[in-house]
Structures are given as C-alpha cells and as structure tokens.
Image: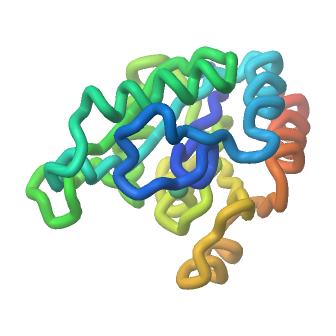
Amino acid sequence: MGKAAVFLDRDDTLIENVPYLGDPDKVQLLPGAKKSMESLQNGNLPLIVVSNQSGVGRGLITKEQVRAVDSRMEQLLGIRFLEYRHCFAAPGDPYDDRRKPSPRMLQESAQEHGLDLARSFMVGNRLSDIQAGHAAGCKTVLLKLRVHPEDEQQSTTLADQCAETWEEAAQWILSRTRVSL
Ligand SMILES: [Mg+2]
C-alpha cells in the first residue's frame, strides 16, 4: 500500500500571497504554518507543495525567482518538503493542462513517489485547490485564513473539512491518519 502524504498550496496557505512574488525577502509565513508543518512531518507525512505560478508563463518572474522564494519559505518553516510541483503556464497557454484545478500535479507526484492518493490530503485556500484534491481522490481541507469571497461558498461545500486555523487543519489530518493506519 502506498504512503499517505499532504499536498499543500503555497500562496495564502503557507505564505502571504504577494502577486507574482519573486523576492525572497518578501516571504512571510501564515500564522501557525511553521508549527503545523513540523507536526505533520513528525507524523511521518511527506509534504508536497503544489502551486500554480503563472507569473513565469506571463513573463513577470523567472523560475529561479520562484525557487528562491521556495527556499526562503522552507528555511523559515524549518522543514523539508518532499518536492515542489509548480505549473508555470499562464491560463490559456496550450501547456496549462497541469494547472489546478487539474489533479495532474498530484497524480504525477503520487506515481513518482508511490503515494496513495486515497489516503492523502490536499490543503488550500481556493476552490481550485479543493477541486484538484477532490479530483485526485484525496481528502480536502479548506484553510480559511485567507479565503476569497467569490469562491468561498463553493469551496466550503466541496471540501471534506474546513479549518479556521492551521492548528485545526493539522489536527484533523493527523487524527484521520491515525484512524486509517
Ligand atoms: Mg492559494
């Protein structure tokens, strides 16, 4: 049987969203993210970032800048992610078929690392995160620290769990993991 993992959106889930962020000095963790990543990692759950970074496809930032932001985030969190899956294509680009809400980035990661999607989780703040996780067969958690009014209702309805804080989200995931072991 494959391993359970936690897929994580980046912007407005782990760090404050700054549109097309390319400056590592502007990385700010969201409240509770550090402690919760430590708890999940201590719970033996591989952590994978799954993020749409269309700023690259739009020519606004480079992949190197995205990497610099990721490294800074990882340094501030004090943990190691198993990997980063980014879709750099802009919407409408012929190569945008990996963009969330597509489940493809999660599926590719599961295949490469022998992960069991049905025992895994997707955490994010937007409907596209919840849709991607749902389509991949994961349990989905809507983290409500930074929700968007235009898709909050739909996200709330589709998500398996809503969490007002990172602590709530991590606790729910860890309790489900223990049950399924
Ligand atoms: Mg987000």
Of all residues shown, which one is farthest toward the left? 94
Residue 21 horizontal side relative to residue 72, left or right:
left
Say which residue appears at 42% left-offset and 44% top-offset: 51
Q: Is residue 79 left or right of residue 85?
A: right
Q: Position of residue 100 (x, y in %)?
A: 39, 55
Count of numbered circles in the view: 0
- Give the position of the N terminus as an image quadrant: top right
Closer to the camera in the image, 109 or 181: 109
Residue nearest the viewer, comparing 73 with 167: 73
Q: Quadrant of the C terminus?
A: top right
Image position, residue 163 (x, y; %): 81, 58
Residue 23 falls left or right of residue 57: right
List x then y, in percent, for residue 158: 64, 71
Q: Quadrant of residue 104?
A: top left
- When asked about the image quadrant of residue 4, the answer is top right
Residue 134 in the image: state x and y as whole percent.
Answer: 55, 57
> Residue at 62% of width from left, 41% of height from top?
28
